[in-house]
Amino acid sequence: MSKTTATRARPLSPHLQVYRLIPTMVMSIVHRITGSALYFGTLLVAWWLIAAASSEPYFDFVSAIYGSWFGQLVLFGYTWALLHHMIGGIRHLVWDTGTGLDKHTATKMAWATVAASVTLTVLIWIAGYMARGA
């Protein structure tokens, strides 16, 4: 039995290089990433609550980690991820009503999601520092 050496031309699927990134596509990707990041952030909240329910020295240890510049950066990122994911969810809820599905409005809503999440994150952190007295 002879083997054939001829290969049939197979159709190629579009590759990522074919697509041009548009704001709604990027926001969809970021929405999934922030959703995954919230799992890690929830573990941080749980760790803080466990430390609060444990002993005072352990709570002070966890508070020192969260109070460091790296801890503050992680908490700032967690705050942004939480707000961005929430606003993205609201955007999807609006789309579920059939509103804002045209290209121009969807792009505006994508940019508004970024602006609102960054603005709210900064405002929450400013309010937190003002309430703390720092």
Image (cartoon, grey):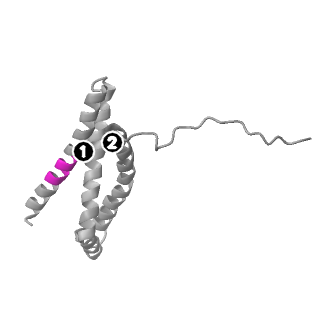
Location of residue 33 with respect to 63 vertically, above or below: above
Let me know if residue 121 is in the magenta part: yes
In percent of width and height, residue 56 lies at 25, 73
Location of residue 28 with respect to 48 vertically, above or below: above
Task: Say how many tags the image has.
Answer: 2
**Which part of the image, by quadrant, shows the C terminus?**
bottom left
The label on residue 114 is 1
Residue beneath disc 2: 27
**Which part of the image, by quadrant, shows the N terminus?**
top right
Give the side of residue 64 with respect to residue 7, left or right: left
Furthest-bottom residue in this view:
57
Mark 2 to mark 1 CA distance (whole Å) = 8 Å
Q: Residue at x 33, y 37 (%)?
A: 24
Which element is circle 1 on?
Answer: helix
Bin the neighbour count of mark 2 within 10 Å (Cα to Cα): few under 14, some 14-19, many 20 and up: many
Q: Residue at x 22, y 39 (%)?
A: 112
Give the side of residue 74 with respect to residue 39, left or right: left
In percent of width and height, residue 21 lies at 37, 41
Furthest-front residue in this view:
6
Which element is circle 2 on?
Answer: helix
Do the residues under discs 2 and 1 have CB atoms within 8 angstroms? yes
The label on residue 23 is none
Q: Which residues are magenta?
A: 117-123
Furthest-top residue in this view:
98
In percent of width and height, residue 17 lies at 46, 44
Q: Quadrant of residue 100?
A: top left
Location of residue 86 with respect to 55 vertically, above or below: above
Give the side of residue 78 with respect to residue 116, left or right: right
Furthest-right residue in this view:
1
